[in-house]
Amino acid sequence: MKKAEDNRREFIRNTMSTAAGLLMMSAIPGEAISAPVVSETAKLDEEIIEPGRIKFAVIGMNHSHIYGQVEAVIRGGGQLVAYYAKEADLTAAFGKKYPDAKLVATEKAILEDKSIQLVLSSAIPDERAPIGIRVMQHGKDFMADKPGITSLEQLAQVRKVQKETGRIYSIMFSERLENRATVKAGELVKAGAIGKVIQTIGLGPHRMSANSRPEWFFDAKRYGGVICDIASHQFDQFLFFTGSNKAEVVASQVGNVSHPQYPKFEDFGDCMIRGNGGTGYIRVDWFTPDGLKSWGDGRLTILGTEGFIELRKNVDIAGRDGGNHLFLVTQKETKYIDCSNEPLPYGKQLVDDVINRTETAMSQEHCFLATELSLKAQKQAQIVKLTV
């Protein structure tokens, strides 16, 4: 998350005469190429919310995504009051960032504090669901980093406890909820800008940076596998943009095609999915080269009956600086929208849900279905073996 935010500094607004624009225009019929291209910037209209609407805490911070999770809830009016992790180096860094919050000695201190309403976690992935279950059993809501659940067995347990307790089990799919271009795309699709959505194509490449990774990063049993881990984002976006509430995995495959020194690791995965609202294709990998200015050239293409939207979330490799790029092509025009100032509503919506017992940030069934699809795709994936 931090690296992605570092790439969102100051955005140069060009016209479609840039190389990126020419590449895109080459796929458009000839009569449309001569039409003028509209360029605009989505305006920032983010409500400033005073802290103290709810009190929240952190249990487990093994991934730096926890900082993005915390910031989202703070933007929504949450007050961070306590945190706990087993690793002293992690809590030391976290404490410097949030000096007003209290480091507690045990997880129990947070679970038994009746003033705390919401708990966040980016613990090692296979530990997140057990933490979330304990949190819900203590009458609190829970927000996990993705993947929030790493096995179908865990999912069954989480579903059972969530139903029994009525608490919120939210997973921060940050590539939609905390990406400004994706938020804007959701507004456009809802407004009917491209007609009925037919298909999504989600690409989630990542930079490996092996020397900076902990041991658990290389063990698929700990992080759930490449589809469970990274592609959970793309399953969330597929369901959201197609409006599907039922879906199946058509085919999936995973492999460790280039890192034999890490035999329990998966560096590539892709899958096809079909829902009652549309179809989808997903590809994820750990092959972002060091020469790219971002951790990954994350892209999403949303095909509709009356046009399409392409998102270049983190970097536009042939044109504009920064991230949050949105290209909209309709029957009338081709438009570029710089979404770097688009508001991020998830944090406020989740705080509202904690207070009002609603589902405005994400329905519980959507959260579980996106997770179920990624887990099934991971479990049934064929193994890719490449030979030179």
Image (cartoon, helix red, strand yellow):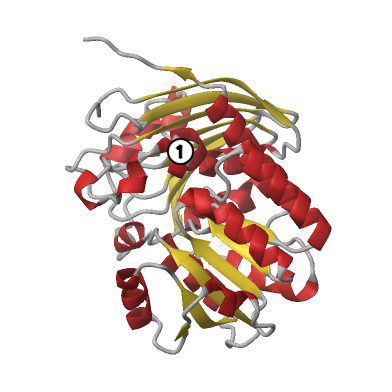
Rendered location of residue 59, percent (x, y): 51, 69
Rendered location of residue 92, percent (x, y): 32, 77
One can see residue 28 in this view: no
Mark 1 nearby-residue class (10 Å; few <14, some 14–19, many ≥20): some
Q: Which corner quadrant of the image does residue 348 belong to?
A: bottom right
One can see residue 220 in this view: yes
Check the image and name the residue furthest to the left: 291
Check the image and name the residue furthest to the top: 388
Which residue is disc 1 drawn over?
221
Q: Is residue 376 above or below residue 313?
A: above
Residue 34 versus residue 358: which sits nearer the camera? 358
Q: Is residue 213 left or right of residue 211?
A: right
Q: Which quarter of the rendering shows the C terminus?
A: top left
Q: Report how many numbered discs are placed on residues in the image.
A: 1
Q: Is residue 130 left or right of residue 162?
A: left
Rendered location of residue 105, percent (x, y): 47, 80
Q: Is residue 280 left or right of residue 114?
A: left
Residue 336 versus residue 254: which sits nearer the camera? 254
Q: Residue at x 44, y 43 (%)?
A: 222
Q: Is residue 284 above or below residue 367?
A: above
Residue 290 versus residue 92: which sits nearer the camera? 92
Q: Residue at x 61, y 29 (%)?
A: 376
Rendered location of residue 250, percent (x, y): 62, 19
Q: Secondary structure at mark 1?
A: helix
Q: Which quarter of the rendering shows the N terminus?
A: bottom left
Q: Amino acid at mark 1?
A: Lys
Q: Residue at x 39, y 58 (%)?
A: 63
Q: Is residue 60 left or right of residue 348?
A: left
Q: Which corner quadrant of the image does residue 89 belong to?
A: bottom left
Q: Is residue 197 above or below residue 343?
A: above
Q: Residue at x 64, y 82 (%)?
A: 113
